[in-house]
Image (tube, grey):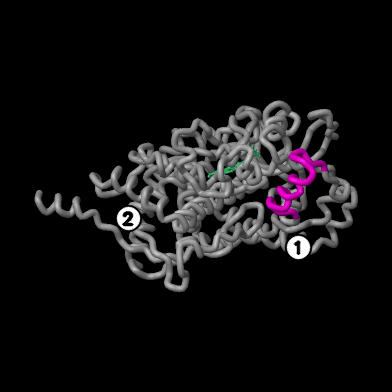
Amino acid sequence: MHNLLGSLPHHTLRDLAKKYGPFMYLKFGQVPTIVVSSQEFAKEVMRTHDAIFASRPKTLYTQIILYSNSDIAFAPYGEYWRQLRKLCMQELLSIARVQSFRHIREEEMNNLMEWIASNDGKVINLSEKIQSSSYGITSRSAFGKKSKDHEEIISIVEESIKLASGFEITDFFPSLSFLALISHSKSRLESVKQRAERIIENIIQEHKDKNIKGGESGIHEDFVDVLLKFHNKDDDDLGFSLTSDNVKAVIWDIFTAGTETSATIVDWAMAEMIRNPRVMKKAQEEVRQVFNKKGMVDEAGISDLKYLKSIVKETLRLHPSSPLLLPRESREKCVINGYEIPKKTRIIVNAWAIGRDPKYWIEPESFMPERFLDSNIDFKGNNFEYIPFGAGRRICPGMSFGLINVELPLAFLLYHFDWKLPKEIMSHEDFDMTELFGISVKRKDHLNLIPMAYYDVSSVERSERE
Ligand code: HEM
C-alpha cells in the first residue's frame, strides 16, 4: 500500500473523490481498497469501526525494511503491537519523558543558531540544517547519543522514503509470490536495509557493551537500553519478548517517524512565512516580545506563543507530513453506509484533501493561522476535518515529541534572525511551494535563505545602563 501511494498522489485521489464521492472503492489487482476523503467517513473508519480498521497491510516494503511488519507503525493489530506501543509511550513519548529531553533540544538549537550566526548575511541551505538537528535531537533522546553515521542514516532514510513511495506491482497481487522474485525494488530495498542494519547493529552493540561494563555512572537508561531488557526473554516476567529483528525494526521506526516528520513541518512553516511576510512579522513580534526580557529562547516560554502554535496548526492542515496517514487494513467484514467492506480491505484516509475541503474550511488554500487562534479544533483525533496525526487506536503516539521539535526550532529561528530571500528569487509571491510527492510530502526545493542576525536594541541599552 505504501507503494500505491506513490502511484496515486493525494491530489489525484482528491480529484477522483470529487468525481466518485468521498468513500471510493477501488480494486488494484487483487486488493480491494477504499479511499476516504470526508470527515464523516473518516469518523466511521477511525472511531465508529476503529477496532475493525486498526490493522496495517503487509507490503514488500514492510516485509523487507520493517522485518515483516515487526515495528510499531506497521505491526498487525494485536497483543505484540499493544505492548510495543505501550512501552514506547512510557519510555520515550510520554509528556514527562519528552520534557526530560529539554536540555538536548535547547543544546541542539543553540548549536544551530551559532552555526547560522557564523553565516550571517550569506545564503544558507536551511532545510539540510533543520533536518540534521532533528536527527540529532531524536538520536540523543532515544539512543543516548548521535550516531557516528549521522549523515549516512539521513541519506538511508531519504532513500527508503523514495522506495516506499514507488509503485510495487507485487503488493497488488499477493497470491502471485513469484512476482516478488522478479521485482526490481526488492533488491534496492534489500540494499537499503543492509546499509541501515549495519548502523542499527552498531547502536545496539554500543548499548550492550555499555551495559556489560555496568553502565557509565550518572548516565540515564535510554530507550534502546529498555528495548534490550526485553530482548530474547524466555521467562514471561516482563510480559513479552523481542527478537533482534524486532528491536531493529523499532529503532528504524523512531529514526524515520521521529525525524523526517518534524523537520518537514519546520521547513513548510518557514516556507509559508517567507511567502507571507505579514505572518512572519506577526510571529517574530510575538516571539521577541515573549523572549526579549531573557534575551534568549527557552522551552519555558513556548506555551505563551499562541500565534506560533496557530502557525504550526495551519502548516499541519495544509502540509500534513503523511497526507494519506498510514494505510489500514480491515480485520473483518464491515458495513458502512450500506456498503459491505470485505475483510482485508485496505483503507487510505486522505487527510490532505480533508484539510483543504471548502465544506469545512474558509478559503482552504490560503495560509491563515488566525483561523486557529480562537478555535477549539485540535489535532488529537476528535475533529475529523483535521487529522494530521490520524485518529483512533493507531493515532500517532509521538505527538508531544514531534510538536515541541517543531515549535522550539521555529521560535529560535524567528527570534534570532530576520530572513531574506536570495537575490535570484524576485518576490515573496514567487517563492516556489511545489510539493515533492511521497509517503511524506516535502517541498521540492531546499530552503535557501539569508539569515540576518537580530539584536534587541532595548536589551543592549538596558545592559549598558546596568
Ligand atoms: C509532528 C510530527 C509528526 C506527525 C505529523 C506525525 C504523523 C503521524 C501519522 C499521520 C500517523 C498515522 C496515524 C494513523 O494511522 O491514524 C503516525 C503514526 C505514528 N507515528 Fe507519528 N507523527 C509525527 C511525529 C512522530 C514522532 C516524533 C514519533 C516517534 C518518535 C512518531 C511515531 C509514530 C508511530 C510509532 C506511529 C504508528 C502508530 C501505530 O500504528 O500505532 N511520530 N504519525
Q: Residue furthest left?
A: 465
Q: Is residue 214 visible?
A: no
Query: Which segment is the magenta one?
Result: 8-25
Q: Which residue is mark 1?
A: 187
Q: Earlier in the sequence, mark 2 or mark 1?
A: 1
138 left or right of 325 in image: left
| Residue drawn 14% across the image and 50% down it | 462
Amino acid type of the residue that numbered disc 2 sits on in the rendered structure: His
Q: CA distance from mark 2 to mark 1?
A: 46 Å
Where does the image place residue 394, in percent across and percent down from the top left?
A: 65, 35
Quadrant of the picture in which ligand 1 is shown: top right
Q: Is residue 14 magenta?
A: yes
- Of residue 87 and residue 392, the one placed in the foreground of this image is 392
How many marks are shown on the rendered structure?
2
Q: Secondary structure at mark 2?
A: helix
Q: Is residue 173 visible?
A: yes
| Residue drawn 84% across the image and 32% down it | 339
Where does the image place residue 232, in percent across and percent down from the top left?
A: 65, 39
Where does the image place residue 333, in percent across and percent down from the top left?
A: 84, 30
Q: Which residue is mark 2?
A: 416
366 left or right of 286 in image: right
Q: Secondary structure at mark 1?
A: helix
Where does the image place residue 164, in percent across and percent down from the top left?
A: 70, 55
Q: Main secondary structure of the magenta part?
A: helix
| Residue drawn 34% across the image and 68% down it | 121
Q: Is residue 368 magenta?
A: no
Q: In the displayed structure, would residue 169 be above or below residue 347?
A: below
